[in-house]
Image: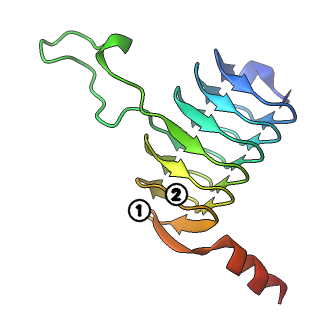
Amino acid sequence: MVIHQPDLVNLYGCSIGDGSKVGAFVEIQKGAAIGANCKVSSHSFICSGVTIEDGVFVGHGVMFINDIYPQAVNTDGTLQTEADWSVVETRIKRSASLGSNCTILGGVTVGEGAMVGAGAVVTHDVPDYAIAAGVPARILGDVRQRARGANA
């Protein structure tokens, strides 16, 4: 793992694989797992319940959400604690790319080799090798077809 500015990151109770790089102003919470050879760019937030497999690119300012119905207080007005809600898990599969400033909601899986465009809000699963963009994110194509077209 490479952290060029360790004083500017907040890592606690997470796991980060060999060869991965973490940029400045990143927070990775307890229970989050980052695979090997990933790049997590600056200003990203990876919360509990997120699993990022090997070789994933996380652009600048990517946000993950692990609570579908967030609230500060219970019905009786008391401040919620960890006991008052459940983490909703999220998985980013091998070699996926998440564009800068995208938001990934809890319970979503982004497929192997998929690409999420900058600023997208991902509310549903993204299939393997799909290109997803927009608010909410929609499937716009297939990475494999775009790659072939670029080399033709």
Type of the residue with mark 1:
Val
Residue lying farthest to the left in this orientation: 76
Name which residue lies at 44% across and 33% down. 66
Measuring from the top left, give residue 123's x and y in whole percent. 40, 53
Q: Position of residue 112 (x, y in %)?
A: 66, 56
In the depicted structure, whether residue 36 falls above or below residue 108: above
CA–CA distance in space, label 2 to label 1: 8 Å
**Which residue is more in the foreground, 120 or 125?**
125
Q: Quadrant of the N terminus?
A: top right
Q: Residue at x 62, y 74 (%)?
A: 142
Residue 95 in the image: above or below residue 26: below
- Vertical position of residue 101 compared to residue 24: above or below: below
Q: Secondary structure at mark 1?
A: loop
User: What amino acid is found at the position of numbered circle 2 in the picture?
Assistant: Gly
Is any atom of residue 26 visible in this view? no
Which of the 4 quarters of the picture holds residue 71? top left
Residue linked to disc 2: 119
Reply above or below: 79 against 43: above
Pick the front one: 5 or 135: 135
Asked if residue 71 can be seen in this view, the reply is yes
Quarter of image, res 145 = bottom right
Give the percent coordinates (x, y) of residue 45. Answer: 57, 34
Left/right of residue 26 with respect to residue 139 in the rendered view: right
Residue designated by label 1: 135
| Residue depicted at 20% across the width and 9% down the height | 78
Report whether 31 appears left or right of 147: left
Pointers 2 and 1 in contact (C-beta within 8 Å): yes
